[in-house]
Amino acid sequence: MLLMAMATLFAFSAYAQGRVVTGTVTAEESGDPIPGVNVLIKGEGSGTITDIEGKYSLDVPSKDTRLVFTFIGLATEEVLVGGQSEINLTMKAEFTQLTEVVVTGYSEFNKKSLSGSIAVIDEKALENVPVATFDQMLQGQASGLYINAGSGQPGTAATIRIRGNGSILGGNDPLYIMDGVPIEADAFAAINPNDISSVNVLKDASSTALYGSRGANGVIVITTKQGKSGATRFNYSGQYGITEVGDWRYDMMNTEERLRYEEMTQRSNGWAYSPNNPNAPDDAAEKLAELKAIDTDWAEVATQLGRSQNHQLSMTGGKGGTSFYISGNYFQQDGVLLGSDLNRYSGRFNIKNDSFDRLKIDLNSYIGYSDLNYVPSEGLSVANPMVQSLNMPYQKPIDDDGNYTYGPLGQNPLEWRDHTSNSRGELKANVSLNAKLDVWNGIFVSGRLGLDYRNRKSNQWRDPEYRPGSGVSNGGEGLYSFNDYSFFSPILLGQIGYAKEFGKHKLAASINSELIQKTYSGHNYTGYGINGKLPNTPGGITQGDPDNGFIASVGGFKESNALLSYFLVGDYSYNEKYNLTFSLRRDASSKFGENNQWATLGAVGASWVVSDEDFFNSGLISFMKVRASYGVAGNQDDTDESIGSYQRYGVFQNTSGYAGTAGIVPASIANPDLKWETSAQFNLGVDVSAFNDRVSLAVDVYNNITSDLFLDQKLSYTSGQGELRINAGEMRNRGIEFVLNTTNVQIGDFKWTTSMNYSYNDNEIMDLGQVSQFENGTSLVEVGKPLGSHYSVGWGGVDPANGQPLYLTADGALTPTYSEDNSTTNWGTSNPPHIGGITNNMSYKGFDFSFFFSFQAGHKLFNNQLYFIENHNVPYNQTTRMLDMWQQPGDVTNIAAPGYAREFSSYDIEDGSFIKLKNVQLGYTLPSAIIGKTPFSSLRVYAQGQNLMTWTKFSGFDPEIGNNIAQFQYPIPRIYTMGIDLSF
Amino acid sequence: MKYKILTLALVVLLGACSDKLDLKPTDTIETSRAYQSFDDLEAGLAGAYSSASGTSAISTSSYQTDMTKMATGGRNIGVTQYNWNYNALGTGVEFTFGWATNYIAINGINLLLAGVESIVPSEEEMERHKQIKGEAIALRAYLHFELFRNYAESYTDGGKLVAPYMTESVISSPERLTVSAFVSQLEADIEEAKSLLAGYDPATPIYVSTSFLQALELKLALYQEDYTKVIAIADTLLGMYDIADIMEIGEVFDRAINSEAGVIFKFAIPDNGGRIGAIWQDSNGTVNFEVTQDFINKFSTDYVDVRQDINISEYDGLNVVGKYLGTDAAVGASDFFVFRAEEILLSRAEAYYYSGDEAKALADLNTLRTARLESYVAGSESGANLLQAIKTERAIELAFEGHRWFDIRRWGDDIIRVDVTAATTPKLLSGGDYRFVMPIPNHELLANTSMVQNPGYQTN
């Protein structure tokens, strides 16, 4: 494909020469020449671009030709060529926030006429961030957008929510659209963020209703970099740095502390060899000295200092209406836990042709491959390196004979690193091909073919000679497993539209049909009895039989679903002052039964640019717009996990059967009434700019009510199943969002701008159908409470008289008796109601400096880790807080005396609020006077730090755990890099 | 022209057609397609056997009695049952005593029976078609008996409540039937299955047969204290099955040998199926429940009892359950023994005793003891001693096979523990305590408005 496209390019360069116009484009503000301005021949789309000195030269067909000069951030200018052969132009700055084009996937809007609520994140926020996936870069960048990394393993997807959780069981991931094609959520490891030019977050019904049955959770629209025609320009950007584990927020005991603790609790070595122990053996002092000579910091053993590097080479150019963007990228990052890393290789080819008078064609194509080594577990498992840090400080990682040592966990992190393998190769391809043809007098037809493909091959290996392999249950001699998983989703979009301007009236409407298919398939095997001489290959597997116990397991699956939509979209604008938008659609999902396969969804929106009215006496306020929208969006669970492709069917499944006869058993009950969750969304917004646009503010309020929630109705087991997934209940999210952009200082060459956003979301469950509450893990889903409410017995402290732990009854009275019946929901929710971010940018001459904070507040997290690190009854090393335990009557402490059961209580629920200094960056751009003497057209060097500081009361490793319960999640790394951006 | 072609091509995109939405399950079988041929019935029956083989009776009879105690180094599984702390609200309580498991299996059988009715067999399939129906109904009866002995408020009072008796697959909110109504449906199923299975003599005791049905009928009669019926059925069965002798009994529980001596019915459980041994011990060796001294003390001190080595094994200094050791390749794997001739013999001994025929009761008891104790000289107990001897013998012979809890309940005896895990472990559950009747799970009460709880349990 690439070759073919290259051939096309060369063909275009053979165009004939005509009349030549030359000139220089300069900026009004500084008087400097502007490189990179698009100079286009109006109506043809062909053109050129200004060089480093702001100069251009262009062949024009006639003197009636009009040239269009465009540059991001500057007002577009149009000039009639006439008899001129030299056209010099001074371009003025433009109020960029309101003239940006906003891409929603199906259509492009001028931001000024928007009536919905859309947050635009431009490439600046995504450029050079030393993080593997783009999703994590969005944290704190837009109002209403919640992002929580969850894992520091490079390549792992973050948890993302737009305006809270709209569904209980039906998936809360937003829909992701890349260049018009839906892409899989939570699978971004193989996507190169450096190719992204902008990310738009669609939040309200009028923006998302275009996505009908999939837009209820909001939509994230990603646009990749497009070519600019003109002389071919190259850009290299590279960075190199280190990754390290952040602050260990809990302090594990060292040898001295551990032995003292053991003595205090009269347990284990510290007591056995204690001089205070009357039964101590004769050689106690010697033994104690031996232990004291060792002081292992297991946190250090289980972690590593890693590298991070990124190299991107891109080229862009084109001629005669054809432009292209080609990039190649290599990204590598080590994880901070032993043995984990990511390597990614990717390439992109985007080409656009509008040189024909009526036809526009563009192709965006991407292929990426990521190779990931991951830690064997990120959860509550002895294989998790974070858990292995609970080994004893008086235990050497490797003994004097060179053998791995095993502490209370029975596992050694170094052995896992050296004698197991967990890896994953992921291939991702995205293609979108678009064609638009003007038929007659404003009527056009267009079509889009797109595909999203991902293949993941994972394998695991356990060396039979070492403990992780000898502990394997099938034969105890290691294992090799392989898992192949594929996702394939083609889409087909057809559109007949009409767009025309009549004086001040602007009308656009289209009817569309769209078909989206998704197919998942996979297969796997696990073989046993590994030959130690054949590491990490399926060749090492021993053929199994009933005697050797090495019988391999095999499995696989396939599944597909489809969505078909017909929809009508209309926009009307009068003088860009009064704007109306409208959409209506019929959607059908193969997931839903014949009774409810089709749904009608839609939205209306309106906006009014008040400042354009004659009566508006601007004064300090230069711009003001009021927006409102209402609509109904749908959710059919795009994750396909909660509402599977065949959820509505009653089915039988295969079983191993009985005595050699294969069997079938019923597995589910049919629900032909299953249908969409629907979300009715109301949004009201105001955009204001003042003080010569130095201050701009956008405020949005919204009220979203999800109805027909996917819920499990309890059935009498006499019907053969305990539950049936149905539609019932209601949940509300309402909130307010602020975005404030200010230019604080602008004196001479010094400029300081601040961009702030803050969002408040209030979630409440209104109705659950059959029941008023149900338990869900450590939380209670209850009417009247927010989703994610922790459900626990209250902690009452420690009785100073006897060191006994006290709990609270449901009424709040102290009691020494622990009973789950006293559980309440007084402990807050795990979903933060307050989120936001603050970015500061400063520039002085060639220097630029920025720092960016993000915060999430008002939520609580269940710290399940405390059960293992603050518990007298487990054999693991403990935090130093345990040394404050109750020892004698009168001691006031929160740590009970030993000898009592360790129960889960509100002691384990902690404030999860945090502020993070996410990124600090200092850069220097060489001035054009100097760069002009080099072969380069621009050069910038920079140094940055990522995740530098976290302020929180949470005592787990990091409050960014991605969910409600801290279970030794992979910590988010701190990263320092230096980089260079070079154009030539 | 080329634009016209393009226009046409783009317009065609609009015509994406709706047959793309007609996607059927690929990895599962739509219920309407499950039973289409005679072979499907065999598959359904195999599924019915495997889903009917739940072993909650074994864990109940072990965790909740004096036979085993929680091991201190264990994973705390079964703690609620061990401490008699279970209630209607506990997590998973719908599975602990088989409420969900049994009804799920019954529903599968009812769907199979609907399939049986819908498929017209060919001439040569006729006989097997009838057998499949008989086997399905027999299993349905068995599963309902399991519900009966767990959830019936009383085994003998015809007016007390049991549970719904399901004979069709339907989403509904059925009421609990009375003991007499439930038992009469159960008996009707047994009778129908008997007539369908008449003359069917499976090659191995892993398939249900008329003997299975008789053994089930006998057990129901024993629970209902209909001793005449117990004796009559036992006479028939013991005429067909000899108990395993002193040499054979060890081989019955040795998975490598797999002797069928005295076995009337057992569920075949494959190596990779639910390993019964896991009720007490994890496959990595962790012991969760160990055998109590209370159980060891039941063994005769005068004779060597071959069952001592069968029932008790040593592991890591602990006495562990030895009946289900499995093989090296499949630790803890075992078939699930449901009816053995020894149970029939012991039931007849008990029936004779309660019918006042102590001599015959003693004779049956001695028959068994002779087959288990080395160089045994016939015993001569009478009266209360004889009854106690029968009970003790039943505890030893049928240990860890899912009987003891229900036997103690039937007898109205107390559970008295001496050897327990912790100072806080309860040691006495008095006969007739409400906890001998299992709680109707809260899930059922929420879902089924016709449902009522058993006495003593709190509901939410």
Image (cartoon, helix red, strand yellow):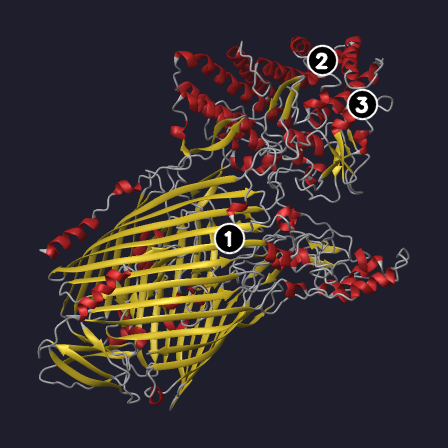
To which residue does mark 2 refer?
B348
Query: What x and y, as percent, mark residue A179?
Result: 31, 61
Spatial CA span between label 2 and label 1: 61 Å
Quadrant of the drawing holding the C terminus of chain B: top right
Q: Is residue A384 visible?
A: no
Q: Label 1 amino acid?
A: Gly
Q: Is residue A816 visible?
A: yes
Query: What x and y, as percent, mark residue B226?
Result: 67, 13
Q: How would you rate the neighbour count of disc 2 (Cα within 10 Å): few for under 14, some for 14-19, many for 20 or more? A: many
Q: Seen in the image, is B346 located left or right of residue B187?
A: right
Query: What x and y, as percent, mark residue A160?
Result: 45, 60
**Which residue is at a point 62% across and 15% down the rendered structure image?**
B217
Residue A208, placed above or below residue A817: below
To which residue does mark 3 refer?
B305
Residue B178, placed above or below residue A387: above
Q: Label 3 amino acid?
A: Asp
Circle 2 SS class: helix
**Marks 3, 1: nearer the viewer:** 3
Quadrant of the drawing holding the N terminus of chain B: bottom left
